[in-house]
Image (cartoon, rainbow, N blue to C red):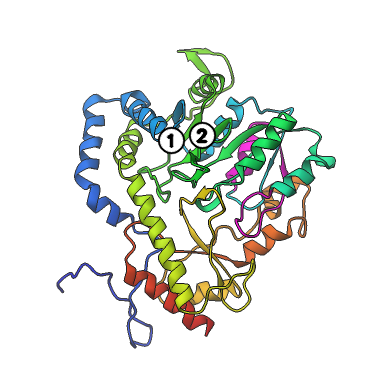
Amino acid sequence: MQKTGLPERVETKNGGAARTPVPMLDLKRQYKALQAELLEALGQVLETQQFILGEHVAAFERAAAEQLGVKHALGCSSGTDGLWLALAGAGIGPSAAVVTTPFSFFASVSAILRAGATPVLADIDPVTFNLSPAAVEAVLDGERGAGVKAILPVHLYGLCSDVTAFSKMGRERGLTIVEDAAQAWGAEWNGVKAGALGDAAAFSFYPTKNLSAAGDAGMVTTNRDDVAERVKMLRNQGMRRRYHHDALGWNARMDGFQGAVLTVKLKYIGAWNEKRRTLAARYDALFAKAALKESGQYPERGVVTPREAPGAKHGWHQYVIRVVRRDALREFLTARGIGSEIYYPVPLHLQEALKGLGYGEGDFPEAERAAREVLALPIFPELREDEQETVVAAIAEFLS
């Protein structure tokens, strides 16, 4: 059969009408456009034999720092290691407690524990899904706030948290601000890019991220020289000089292949993010045209689409709707070959591994409700208009 460039068709179990699948993400489309550049970059690593850190990583660090407008950008082995390095580099350790959100990936809390600190949770804003400044203030003024030394806001789905409010808390209360910017490369808050908003920040370059490596990789950014110096030491087994260990560090170094891949992709990330913005706006228009878009905070019979907070420029790592009967809708989409994902089905305070934090069901009602209602739809720069139309038409069919 001659290939047309369109997705293959899915056969139904009963041999009836076939449907065109829509992937949640298709990295092959991106690779096809960059194949020659990426292979050349990987070949240069093999030529130089600089497999761990080295000039390929250093070149990416310099370019990344310039793009983000930060003084220091330090490559590491993963976003999870980046969070630990950012916390430890900023001096957050066993005597500290850190306020963060229960509605995030596990690493947002596990990194705090790995630093030896105590996670303290506060509920989210129901519109942005990000850490609520009002909830954080309540925690700081309450019983659990006594030992808090830092706030770790998560820029969830690529939308910056209210850094204005958290920075004010930091100044007034002497708190360190560490950004979990794992999903937010290129996002902005009042014209300042994520990664340059706090004392330190951590990024992930996991293959599904907007700026993606060919494997695991991460980065710590900071404008503080003391934080940067400590991160460099900690990511390399606690060494400032070879075989002289000044602290209990870790093997958290970025490899040369990832530095080379990321240097290539960094040239395109601005255009890719703009394409994501276009796709997000098109989803909004399609849901409105289908009379499915609802204006409230919570879904009733239709769909609550994501919103851009005042002063924020969304990175659109994910396009996440709120909808009733979420699980049934996802099953419906899956049966039609349409990708979707739930970020995240279980809030962190209800995770088995985190029972020791002392929280239970009902403690964070907004996070718990979001976990029941959120659904991420396909959004990546190469997604086609007809694929978006297929997604929205299927959701309209389900909700009719």
Q: What's the residue at 77%, 60% (across, down)?
A: 362
User: As shown in the figure, which amino acid type bears the numbered disc 1?
Assistant: Leu
Q: Nearer the viewer, residue 382 or 297?
A: 297
Taking the image as drawn, is residue 378 in sight? Answer: no
Q: Is residue 135 magenta?
A: no
Residue 317 coordinates in the image, percent (x, y): 46, 53
Determine whether, in the image, residue 238 is placed left or right of residue 177: left
Residue 275 coordinates in the image, percent (x, y): 35, 56
Q: Quadrant of the N terminus?
A: bottom left
- Mark 1: few, some, or many residues within 10 Å (few <14, many ≥20)? many
- The tag earlier along the polypeptide, 1 or 2, is 1
Residue 211 coordinates in the image, percent (x, y): 39, 45
- Which residue is most to the right? 143
Compared with 294, 45 (above or below) is: above
Q: What's the residue at 64%, 36% (across, down)?
A: 167
Compared with 160, 302 (above or below) is: below
User: As shown in the figure, which amino acid type bears the numbered disc 2?
Assistant: Ala
Give the structural element (helix, strand or loop) at label 2: loop
Boundaries of the magenta span: 106-132
Q: Is residue 108 magenta?
A: yes
Mark 1 vs 2: CB contact within 8 A: yes
Give the structural element (helix, strand or loop) at label 1: helix
Compared with 2, 381 (above or below) is: above
Determine whether, in the image, residue 89 is placed left or right of residue 141: left
Taking the image as drawn, is residue 43 in sight? Answer: yes
Identify the residue position indicated by label 2 in the image: 196
Residue 68: give its label: 1
Residue 136 coordinates in the image, percent (x, y): 73, 45
Residue 65 is drawn in which quadrant? top left
